[in-house]
Image: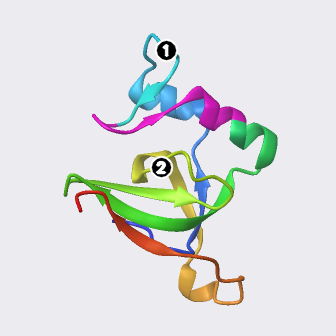
Amino acid sequence: MKYKVRDIVKIKAWDDMVDEFGIDDDSDINISPVICFAKDMEQYLQEKVPSRIVTIKEAGRFKNKYDFYIIEGTDQWHWDDSMIEELVEDSDASKFFKATKLSFIDMDK
């Protein structure tokens, strides 16, 4: 897992991910066998977070193989390292941010 809970990261642009991974028949970008960047995720970012800079709220692993993150403001999608352009601020430097319910999720249990 490349990033930590409370890290502030920038999500890649839609077009950059399309160039990197391609787009499927449902207009989603398949990142891995279990994670895709859906058009709804892009719409959420455009409407709520135009800067594309988000805070990682939770981190987890699915099938002991696929790391994922949940960002603040939404619980319905999983994000992964391939969707993140860069680290904006390390969580060690972000201790002044309000703590919320943060946890590691093991989807295999």
Could you tell me which residue is drawn at 49 percent across and 67 percent down?
Answer: 58
| Residue placed under numbered mark 1 in the picture | 26
- Would you say residue 40 sits in the magenta stretch? yes
The reply to whether residue 23 is visible in this rendering is yes
Crowd band around label 2 with a 10 angstrom C-alpha radius: few (<14), some (14–19), many (20+): many
Could you tell me which residue is drawn at 57 percent across and 44 percent down?
Answer: 12
The amino acid at mark 2 is Trp
- Would you say residue 38 sits in the magenta stretch? yes
Q: Quadrant of the C terminus?
A: bottom left
Quarter of image, res 72: bottom right
Q: Which residue occupies the extreme top position in the image?
A: 25
Provide the secondary structure element on which disc 2 rests: loop
Quarter of image, res 67: bottom left
Provide the secondary structure element on which disc 1 rests: loop
- Vertical side of 83 occupied by 106: above or below: below
Check residue 79 in the rendering and tell me which mark sits there, or answer none: 2
The range drawn in magenta is: 32-43
Could you tell me which residue is drawn at 43 percent across and 65 percent down?
Answer: 59
Q: Position of residue 100 (x, y in %)?
A: 64, 78
Relative to 85, is 72 on the left or the right? right
Whole-angstrom CA distance, mark 1 to mark 2, is 18 Å
Between discs 1 and 2, the one toward the N terminus: 1
User: Number of marks in the image?
Assistant: 2
Relative to 30, is 50 on the left or the right? right
Foreground residue among 100 and 7: 100
The reply to whether residue 50 is visible in this rendering is no
Foreground residue among 103 and 27: 103
The amino acid at mark 1 is Asp
Q: Position of residue 88 (x, y in %)?
A: 62, 67
Foreground residue among 4 and 99: 99
